[in-house]
Image (cartoon, helix red, strand yellow):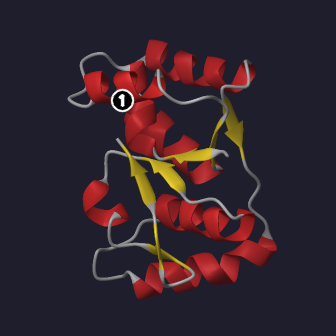
């Protein structure tokens, strides 16, 4: 079963200086690719790694070799993403998180690789199902 990956682990895996690097590197050894993600997560990671071209290159390489798979988002996903951002607006839920939750609901996925336990422990799939969070 595919595991959805959030921005934090992508940054941590490609940047040894990141505070979550050791934990994420340990987790990645225990799971089988591919990991899945969405364009908003990729855009967020690339933006946050703007001064680290080697880290950005490593993410591109993960995509090229199939260790990271980009899952589609389409027009039909927009209403639910908007609804999720409104529902969790007090957190606030960002676009990348909402897109991941939407894809999980749509594709029947439930495992998330994220360092953002604070938010992801609150989010629910279909408003009731808890997420399985790594690490």
Q: Residues within 10 Å of mark 1 (few under 14, many from 20)?
A: many
Q: Residue at x 73, y 25 (%)?
A: 66
| Residue 49 appears in the figure | no
Nearer to us in this view, 58 or 115: 115
Residue 42 found in image quarter: top right
Instruction: Say if 6 sits above or below 98 in the image.
Output: above
Query: Does residue 133 lie above or below 73 as drawn?
Result: above
Expressed as whole percent of the image width and height from the top left, the position of residue 89 reads 36, 82
* Above-or-below relation of 93 to 97: below
Q: Is residue 30 left or right of residue 78?
A: left
Q: Which residue is mark 1?
A: 24
Helix, strand or loop at mark 1: helix
Q: Residue at x 26, y 31 (%)?
A: 20
Q: Residue furthest left?
A: 19
Residue 26 appears left or right of 129: left
Total tally of numbered discs in the picture? 1
Residue 103 visible: yes
Q: Where residue 101 appears, x then y in whole percent?
A: 55, 66
Q: Is residue 122 left or right of residue 113?
A: left
Is 22 located above or below residue 129 in the figure? above
Tell which of 99 and 29 is nearer to you.
29
Say which of 130 and 51 sits in front. Answer: 130
- Where's residue 91, x and y in %? 28, 75
| Viewer-side residue, 47 vs 36 | 36
Query: Residue 130's x, y, as percent?
Result: 44, 70
Residue at the (48%, 51%) spot, across then down: 112
Q: Quadrant of residue 52?
A: top left
């Amino acid at each position: 079963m595919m595991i959805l990956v959030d921005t934090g682990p992508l940054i941590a895996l490609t940047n040894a200086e990141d505070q979550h690097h050791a934990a994420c590197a340990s987790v990645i050894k225990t799971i089988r690719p591919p990991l899945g993600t969405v364009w908003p997560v990729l855009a967020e990671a690339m933006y946050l790694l703007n001064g680290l071209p080697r880290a950005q290159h490593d993410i591109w390489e993960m995509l090229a070799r199939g260790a990271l798979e980009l899952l589609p988002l389409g027009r039909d996903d927009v209403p639910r993403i908007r609804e999720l951002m409104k529902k969790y607006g007090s957190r606030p839920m960002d676009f990348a998180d909402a897109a991941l939750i939407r894809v999980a609901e749509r594709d029947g996925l439930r495992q998330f690789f994220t360092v953002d336990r604070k938010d992801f422990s609150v989010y629910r799939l279909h408003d009731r199902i808890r997420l399985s969070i790594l690490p």
